[in-house]
Image: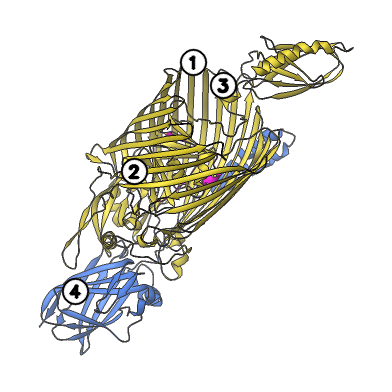
Amino acid sequence: MNEKNSNSKTMNINFLNLNSMKTNKFIIKAVLCFALISSFTSCSDDDPDAVNEEEIITNLTLTFTNTADANDIVVMSSVAPDGLEDGVTAETVVGDFSTGATYALRLALSNASETPAEDVLNGDIIPEADEHFFAYAVNGINLTLTRDAGDVDGPDGSKLGVETTWVAGAASTGNVQIRLIHEPSSVDDSNEFGTTTGGSEDFNITFEDVEIDD
Amino acid sequence: MTRFIIGVVMALSCYSYSQNCKFTFLGELNDFHDGSPISSATIYIKEKDKYIVSDLDGKFKIENLCSGTLTLTISHVGCETKTVSYSIAGDTFKRISIEHHVEELNEVSVSASSTKKETTTAQETVIKANTLKKYSALNLGDALKEVAGVSSINTGNTIVKPMINGMHSSRILIMNNGVRQQDQEWGIEHAPNIDINSANQISVIKGSGALAYGGDAVGGVVVINSGRVILKDTLYGRTIIGGQTNGKGYNISSTLNKNYRSGWFAQIQGSYKRNGDFKAPDYNLTNTGLDSKGLSVQFGKKKFESGFEIFYSYLNNEIGILGASHIGSVFDIERAINAGQPLLIEDFSYDINAPKQKITHHLAKANYFKRFQGFGKVSLQYDYQNNQRLEFDVRIGDRRDIPAIDLTLQTHSILADVNLDSNLDRKINFGIMGRYQNNFADPDTGVRRLIPDYDKYDFGIYTTTEWRLNDNLLVDAGLRYDFNRIDAKKFYRISRWEERGYDEDFSDIIIEELATQLLTNPVFNFHNISASVGTRLNLDEKNQLLFNYSLASRPPNPSELFSDGLHHSAARFELGDLRFDKELANRVSLSYSHNTSRLRFLSEVFYNRITDFIYLRPFDFILTGRGPFPIWEYQQTDAELFGIDLTVTYDITDALQWQNKTSLTKGYDLEADLPLIDIPPFSTMNQLRYLNTKWYNFSASLKSEWVFEQNEFPDFNFEVEDQLTGDMILLDISTPPPAYHLLHFYSEATFALSEKTSLNVGLGINNLFDTSYRNYLNRLRFFADDIGRNITLQIQLNY
């Protein structure tokens, strides 16, 4: 590499010495020489660096804790080693809800591809809460939620949805969905689950066969 | 002829002025190329203020000369006027070579408006400066639509990619002032980075007939030329200032030329364009602003025998992409389609936010040519291009200002070309080309690379020949060989590597194993043969036939080989294939033209059969954290395209002209027995134009643009399950929008301000009735209507 560089530099000097030549010939050769120099200097045998994917979320965990019994916990988690955005995910649900019980939901979003794992929720989303919104939905299961008074403020006077309280109704089995919407055009949390228009979904995860037992 | 007679008269009268001087000058005029004698040339003798004429052998005699200087100015029909001086000290004989067929070689042109075609038997249309000026505020892709059969594939209103007979991107080769444009043209959202204001003339060549430029132009070639050099002492320029109501846009462009009789020339040109959010008839198209700056400088010396040129151009475009098109999942697309209007509409603004593109393109070239007597012209060229493409996505936190895509593409080319034109009935052209290209994808984006780092080497050698068999029959042929080598360093996720089956076929290219990724070193060599043969037959004075057959060979582009990931704005995965081989196109075309004083009719038909045609098709689904995504895979298949383009101009009266341009293109995947995607629908354009040359060159035209619904399209609609409810949701991403009809008005007049200064004022109204429509070939058609009425006013000052 270095050798090539010095060769082409020598060539360059040679041409400069030939200043008695006709201008035209000099120009052609200077141009060709410049071409050679530029090609050599732009060659690189270095291997590219792997991209450090900063924006991804690899782990989403919803931990529901019975406000009356700290041992009654339901954990829903979604893991995507390549990131939730475009990687394949695996969902697991551990534990069942108990009829009539009230649960506090704690959310955790992290990027475990970094060491130590990056807290995406507190590091990225909460600081920009006015551009984000968590929307929830259930189907077939008797769960209701309220956004806590202490919840982080979201866009348009809404509550972001990171601090929520859930109540389990009659025994049932169904699906629970959580979505994170980035830059929604409008949000509405009057029905607590939350609806939006516009924006883009950062993730859209459904946990299936969640149970409420008597 | 008049000159000849005057010359003869003058020559005869010469004798009456005999003086005491006694020397004789004998001159012989011959052709620079083949040495043949030039008869009937007019020779002006400055010292005697006399004219004489050369005889049949090209000889002339001046008698009774005094000692001292003799200055002769030699002119001949179709020749460059040449002035020579001799010092006379006795009887003298001189052989003087003059350039005889300037018009045919078009090397030194006296008229800036003369048309120079790039090819002889291909389907070529030239767009001249006078037409181009109307597009000063627009894009190259918009201007090219002046040609029947040329459409565009758009991302919104400012990313406009030319499409020739249904082909675009890597299948179209763009020559920008003699340099093959290298600006990541494989991407459907990557418009050519060329300032339309730097062009003086554009040739559109359908098919790959122009082999000197490349052998891979499956769709066609676009040749952009800047202004010609005028061999006289002159300073001239033009300034264009325009304003547009839609988008509250404004543009300014200025060109200044300085030419010297000695052949030295210089040109500087700059332009600036700005617009805010465009407006569809019913709503604002939020975040569709544009900020574009262009500069070009050119200087050199151009004589008939030799010349050189140094050229540099710079273009910087910042382009906003419709905010509502930023989507995260197929559910977002489904909501956007069902909403029927953008889900993000804000008040007008000039702000350009993410998603946006920021592209900088530098182009520098130096060339030199020399003509050798009795041989031909030798040209040498070196050029360098630097293209930086930044694409900003909607991101959060500190990363808001970091682009999601950051590609730097550098290209060096050297070219040597020899044009043997000593025999104008048997022209031969051959050349050799070498190119080195480096692509660098900056890892600091924090987003996995869209395409990898690579080095690319190209080597090409070509020859073309043109034989004029008689006055009415001309035959041309060409042959080209290209070698391409691409040497990439690409990271693959292990999951993808295995899913693609590369672990079995390409295990030898792995150079490093990381936790979840593999670093690989794919190296591919492609050998391409391309050819062209054609004929031009003049049936009679009014009727002409052109026939051309061309073979094009296109190696797969980086995205076809290496694509591997989510294409955000399309909400789909796109996967390339390392196993691809080159694409081969056999295209035949036939043109018939009929020209009378009132009627000009041109019919162009073509059939293009492409083996191993590479295109994207849906293939499978992947279930991600954002729900299911369709996976589109590049596939190789056999395809055919055919069509007809008609251009008819009829002068109803001297002042009233009717023009029709109609185009029909069909394309099919022969293996899957499906129509090809993104084929332009049938369209017909009618224009009525009134022209009054006596009254300030006033013209007014009404243009009707009627685009039909594309009824042949592949059904790539799909259903996804809403996991929450278990319902199936249909995504109709295939059905083309309905037909539409638009009316456009344009009027202009030119006022002479002084002998050398004129002012041209143009007023246009596009989409006169503010019609709402969506265009099948606009990739943002799922999200919003196209733009509504736009009133444009443009003032051009020529000086």
Drawn side of residue A138 relative to residue B119, left or right: left
Of badges 3 and 1, the one in the foreground is 1
Magenta segment range? B179-205
Q: Circle 3 is placed at which residue position? A: B421
Q: CA distance from mark 3 to mark 1?
A: 17 Å
Residue positioned 67% across, 42% down in the render: B754
**Residue occupied by mark 2:** B706
Q: Is residue B187 magenta?
A: yes
Same chain check for tags 3 and 4: no
Q: Which residue is mark 1?
A: B471
Question: Who's blue, chain-wise?
Answer: A
Q: Residue furthest right?
A: B20
| Three-letter amino acid code of the residue under disc 4 | Val
Write down the residue under mark 4. Answer: A138
Q: Nearer the viewer, residue B627 or A61?
A: B627
Question: Front-most of B65 and B404?
Answer: B65
- Residue B728 image offset from top left, x and y in percent: 17, 60
**B727 shown above or below B305:** below
Quarter of image, res A129: bottom left
Are callouts 1 and 2 both on one chain? Answer: yes
Comparing marks 1 and 2, which lies closer to the viewer?
2
Dot 1 or dot 2, earlier in sequence: 1
At numbered mark 1, what does the secondary structure look like: helix, strand or loop? loop
Q: Are marks 3 and 1 on the same chain?
A: yes
Residue B242 visible, this orientation: yes
Secondary element at image label 3:
loop
Q: Nearer the viewer, mark 2 or mark 3?
A: 2
